[in-house]
Amino acid sequence: MTGQTAEHMMDIHQILKLLPHRYPFLLVDRVVELDRGKRIQAIKNVTINEPFFTGHFPARPVMPGVLMLEALAQAAGLLSFDMMGEAPGDDKVFYFVGIDGARFKRPVEPGDQLILDVELDRIKGGIYKFKGVARVGDSVACEAEIMCTMRTVA
């Protein structure tokens, strides 16, 4: 469907085929919307069983901001692989290479569902630039501009 808009979802099995991340670092549970080459909406279900809650923070568990950014970057990776129409191999890696304007607006706690909205802003010189917003319900938890690139590894 090259050149056309494709609305579709991905379950965890499809996500595992596209992202190299595994527990405890896989931070996308489901894709609920994907507009090929334009935008993606994905979900991360945040549970008390997450290993980072043991130390961040024992008395008041809060999801680390850098992991919210990583979840946005993983959603951006899914959008990119879908757009290219290929799955990553052992010879290709999609690297998170930069971030601008990161802002954290509210804490994310166990029981929250993090909604990840990522939009492709532009591609220039092999660098993909995305605008990402992570929400809990209607409240913005985190927002940032994320840059990623694909590299072939030996």
Image: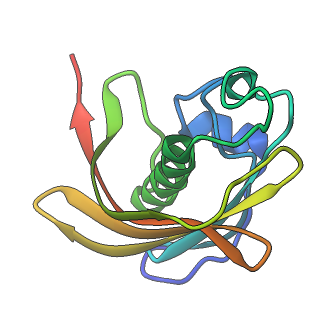
**Residue 130: x and y, percent?**
37, 67
Side of 46 where 23 appears, left or right = left
Side of 3 where 1 appears, left or right = right
Task: Give above or below for 41 relative to 25.
Answer: below
Task: Give above or below for 64 relative to 5.
Answer: above
Q: Residue at x 67, y 26 (%)?
A: 52
Out of 84 and 145, give the one closest to the viewer: 145
Q: Residue at x 63, y 24 (%)?
A: 22
Q: How is the image coloured?
A: rainbow
Residue furthest to the top: 154
Task: Give above or below for 140 relative to 80.
Answer: below
Q: Residue at x 46, y 77 (%)?
A: 38
Side of 89 where 44 appears, left or right = right
Task: Give above or below for 27 relative to 116.
Answer: above
Image quadrant of residue 138? Answer: bottom right
Quadrant, the C terminus: top left
Image quadrant of residue 60? Answer: top right
Count of numbered badges drawn on the protein: 0
Residue furthest to the bottom: 4
Out of 56 and 11, give the one closest to the viewer: 56
**Residue 30: x and y, percent?**
75, 52
**Residue 63: x and y, percent?**
67, 42
Out of 30 and 2, give the one closest to the viewer: 30
Residue furthest to the front: 59
**Residue 8: x and y, percent?**
71, 69
